[in-house]
Image (cartoon, coloured by chain):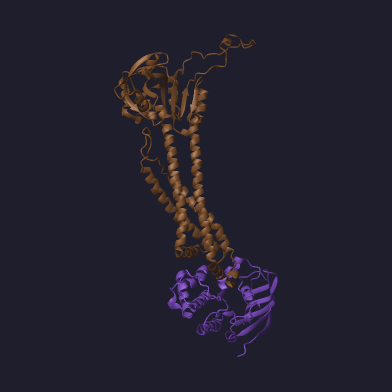
Chain colours: A purple, B brown
Amino acid sequence: MSIALQADNIVKYFLEPEKFQVLKGVSFDVKQGEFLSIVGKSGCGKSTLLYILSTMDTDYEGSLSIKGNKLTGKSQNELARFRNEHLGFVFQFHYLLPEFTALMNVMLPALRLGRYSKEEVEERAIAKLRLVGMDEYAHKHASKLSGGQQQRVAIARALINDPAIIMGDEPTGNLDKANSTRVFDIFRELAQDNQQTIITVTHDMDFANRSDRIIEMQDGLILDIHEPAR
Amino acid sequence: MNWKLSFKIALTHLVTKKKQSMIAMLGVMFGISMFIIMISFMTGVNQFLEDITMDNTPHVRIYKPIEIQDRKIISEQRAPSERDWYVVQHQKPKNDMPRIKNGLQVMASIEDMPEVKGVAPLVASQVFYNNGPVQIPGTINGIDVRKQIAVFGLDTKMDFGKLEDLLKGGDMLVMGKGLAEKMGVSVGDRVSVTTPEGNNLTLKVAGIFSFGIAAMDETRSYATLATVQKILQKDPSYITDINIKMKDVNAASVFRKKLENQIPGVYVEDWETANASILAGDKIRNILTAVVCITLLTVAGFGIYNIMNMNIINKMKDIAILKATGFQGGDITGIFLLQSLMIGVAGGVLGLLIGFFFSYLLSKAPFPAASFFRISTFPVNFKLSHYVAGLSFGFLTTLFAGYFPSKKASKIDPVQIIRG
């Protein structure tokens, strides 16, 4: 199996309010099609690490490559293009654009990518919404959906460009049991059937224990990488 | 970068925030419409003032000034080599008539010049109009009636009677409205005119004119060249002024210099020199108009700047999501710049329409002018260039006002927003 993501000795400082080392040299690989969970206490640096992996945070030391592309040191615009094509995100607080319909929210990254015509993008977006069971709400405004529904639309949006890696920051953080199981199942399926790599940061040990591998972090260092205890 | 997509997002933002967009648009609209009204009215007034002056002002005027010569007449008999001193106390001017030598020939030769639209001769003299025992000072101008009509359109200034009636012969004149009122005469009455030399003649009033300029209407009258030459007891070749209308008004001062070199012994004056004070007034009004308009547009621009800034603060989360999902800095700038431009163009077009509407109303509103003004409604200019300028001003102001907030939006760090 090929390596999807490689992090090498990532070091990150917070400068405000005073200089503080959040990540103290983190290195690990993620294989393609793997479902990886990063766990740890609040403040251990796991979200910070995820934002570095997501390429949105560029202010770090060490190096990061995704699918063999070294991303450290690239310009913001190159990174944006890369994210658009190869990365999908699911955030803790759903984060849809409230002015747009669910369908449009899903379509926007694909329209930005411009790989398919508008009609094809719409078709694909509907298919992704069907995958998360939200196709009947396609034409509803995002602001009219419940939290769980928005989270599922956000997953559909993360999937629209068939990214190699899908990252989730507490993707089930504020969902009830039923919805969170649902989200987990979707991730599981993506990893198994589509060979898409999933990296999630989570507090939810149930969720982590059902993934392929767990990275446990403490005080900016990797404490342990292990297979979940089933 | 994908303009169509940016446009769609920008439009959606505007439509969902209708109230805010409307207010921003109203700001631009108000600015542009005031700009149009102001500039239409101001240039209308300028045009009107220029017209009433220029109608009666020749572009170039040739006349013979009476001037006291510095050269002492007594010295003319001596050779210049003699270094004598002559002191002449209180030297009087020579009895040199204000005649232009060979005036009619000079006129004919000027008429053939390509820059010239028309030439009219004039015999001007100061006279007293006798109203019983009271003498009213004024001037009488002898004119070539047909040329005066062709070059200055004097016939359009007639309130009563016809200018052409002067051609019927007999001793007739047309006089200014104010003068006729002072004299208490109307068409068909007779007035007696006395020249400074003491010649007296009785003339019949053939018509009454008004220029709308009190100084002219209260002192001036016109008669044929022959009539005035008769009053002055001069020969038919006696003329005092040659008035020239140019094809291109702005070529007057160049043409003046040319004439100065060609015709000796006369004084040539162009309209810019003659009307320096009016031109200065025009300039000041133009500057005022520009200042007011720029102020209005700047205020509208700051309004947009504020609203766009607020808008971007409200949309921080959205910007972060767009960036996280792969929108680049340029896309974000585009989205917000387009919003601002849409506000600018919509407000601009509406402003033009409203500006046009109100300046049209103004042009139809009765003008409460003194009765001697030949004008019944407010003078308003409708010029395409003003509308083009208004729209491009609106466009540019919103472009600038939108650019800085948009640039700021593109620099927003998504991580900071998403982390919360």
Residue pictured at 49% horizontal, 57% vertical: B341
Residue at the front extreme? B133
Q: Is residue B87 visible?
A: yes
Q: Which residue is drawn at the image coordinates 49% and 25% (left, top)?
A: B268
Q: Is residue A21 left or right of residue A99?
A: right
- Residue B171 location, x and y as percent? 32, 18
Image position of A37 (left or right of B208): right
**Which residue is at the front of the view, B353 or B240?**
B353
Q: In the rendering, at what x and y percent does residue B140 appear?
A: 39, 21
Taking A197 as reference, is B15 above or below it?
A: above
B171 to A43, vertically: above or below = above
Where is residue B20 shown, x and y percent of the image?
A: 47, 61
Residue B395 higher or lower than B211, as above or below: below
Q: Residue furthest left?
A: B188
Residue extending farthest bottom: A230
In this rendering, is residue B355 above or below A57? Answer: above
Q: Does residue B226 appear in this view?
A: no
Residue B415 appears in which quarter of the rendering?
bottom right
Which quadrant would the N terminus of chain A be assigned to in this image?
bottom right
On the rendered image, what quadrant is the C terminus of chain A found in? Answer: bottom right
Is residue B216 or residue A2 the one in the foreground?
A: B216
Name the spot of residue A101 as percent of width and height, x first.
Answer: 45, 71
Q: Nearer the viewer, residue A69 or A185?
A: A185
Q: How many marks?
A: 0
